[in-house]
Image (cartoon, helix red, strand yellow):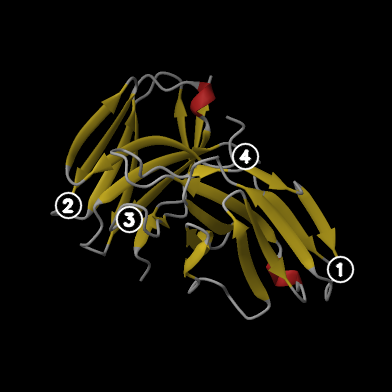
């Protein structure tokens, strides 16, 4: 079993829809949780960062962490065609330590 | 800041040849990571350095892979000899420790390696 599991998709939604992306993990030591967006032929770029449990909001993006269920989510409101990309979750037990990535979920937002 | 700079962007080589990938991290960052990305396995951590010292190389697949960081502004990943199964996108990333909210990896644009 992988330490981090993520549905590869693809996930296709109409413009304006609310998107929910999820990851599950097995290592209870993970404390730092991140979401990265990767456009085709580009490196991943950090979208959201959360320490421990709780919610964090940034514009149209909300990240949620449920450590009791070992489950994290990224919500995208009012999705746009420019949001079409692969979304990777990443997590780490310690600051500056080795980050473990999910395999990514491909998202397509249709105009 | 120019961000993390990787070279070359694309590398096509023949099986058995030596391949060297290069990375310049963001100035002032003290952690440097090398990742490999494939469709099947996603992003895999190969090795990471802290203050130019290798901390964990458990992800390096075989002795054919080696990485060095001779100074704070330069790192190389070498594959010798290369094999077709090494074909992937190789990413370098850097981060800064010791600052709240610093647990952010900044990635380069990657090197697309094709071994024929």
Q: Choose the circle earlier in sequence order: 3 or 2.
A: 2
Q: Is residue B12 visible?
A: yes
* Of marks 3 and 2, the one in the foreground: 3
- Letter of the chain that mark 4 sits on in the rendering: A
Do labels 4 and 3 touch, CB within 8 Å?
no
* Element under disc 4: loop
What mark, if any, has residue B14 been given in the picture?
1
Q: Choose the circle earlier in sequence order: 4 or 2.
A: 4
- Letter of the chain that mark 2 sits on in the rendering: A
Residue picked out by circle 3: A92
- Letter of the chain that mark 3 sits on in the rendering: A
Q: Choose the circle earlier in sequence order: 4 or 3.
A: 4
* Residue at (83% x, 76% y) in the render: B16
Q: Quadrant of the N terminus of chain A?
A: bottom left
Instruction: Give the residue at the far front of this rendering.
Output: B71
Marks 3 and 1, Cα distance to the nearest angstrom?
Answer: 36 Å
Residue picked out by circle 2: A67
* Of marks 3 and 1, the one in the foreground: 3
Give the percent coordinates (x, y) of residue B27: 55, 40
Marks 1 and 4, Cα distance to the nearest angstrom?
Answer: 25 Å
Circle count: 4
Instruction: Give the residue at the far left of this rendering.
Output: A68
* Residue at (50% x, 47% y) in the render: B94
Marks 4 and 3, Cα distance to the nearest angstrom?
Answer: 23 Å
Up-down relation of residue A103 to residue A48 (above or below): below
Do labels 1 and 2 touch, CB within 8 Å?
no
Mark 3 crowdedness (10 Å alpha carbons): few <14, some 14-19, many ≥20:
many
* Residue at (29% x, 56% y) in the render: A94
Mark 4 crowdedness (10 Å alpha carbons): few <14, some 14-19, many ≥20:
some
Marks 1 and 2, Cα distance to the nearest angstrom?
Answer: 47 Å
* Element under disc 2: loop
């Amino acid at each position: 079993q992988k330490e981090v599991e993520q549905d590869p998709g693809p996930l296709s939604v109409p413009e304006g829809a609310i998107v929910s992306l999820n990851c599950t993990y097995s290592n209870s030591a993970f404390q730092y949780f991140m979401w990265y967006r990767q456009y085709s032929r580009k490196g991943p770029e950090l979208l959201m960062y959360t320490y421990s449990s709780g919610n964090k909001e940034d514009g149209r993006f909300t990240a949620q962490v449920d450590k009791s269920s070992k489950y994290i989510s990224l919500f995208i409101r009012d999705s746009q065609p420019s949001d079409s990309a692969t979304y990777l979750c990443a997590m780490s037990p310690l600051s500056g330590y080795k980050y473990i990535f999910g395999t990514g979920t491909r998202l397509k937002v249709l105009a | 800041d120019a961000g993390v700079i990787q070279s070359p962007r694309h590398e096509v080589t023949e099986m058995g040849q030596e391949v060297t990938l290069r990375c310049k991290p963001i100035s002032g960052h003290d952690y440097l990571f090398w990742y490999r990305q494939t469709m099947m396995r996603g992003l895999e951590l190969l090795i990471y350095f802290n203050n130019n010292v290798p901390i964990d190389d458990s992800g390096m697949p075989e002795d054919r892979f080696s990485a060095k960081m001779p100074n704070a502004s330069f790192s190389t990943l070498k594959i010798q000899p290369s094999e077709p199964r090494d074909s992937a996108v190789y990413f370098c990333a850097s981060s800064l420790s010791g600052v709240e909210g610093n647990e952010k990896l900044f990635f380069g644009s990657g090197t697309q390696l094709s071994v024929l």
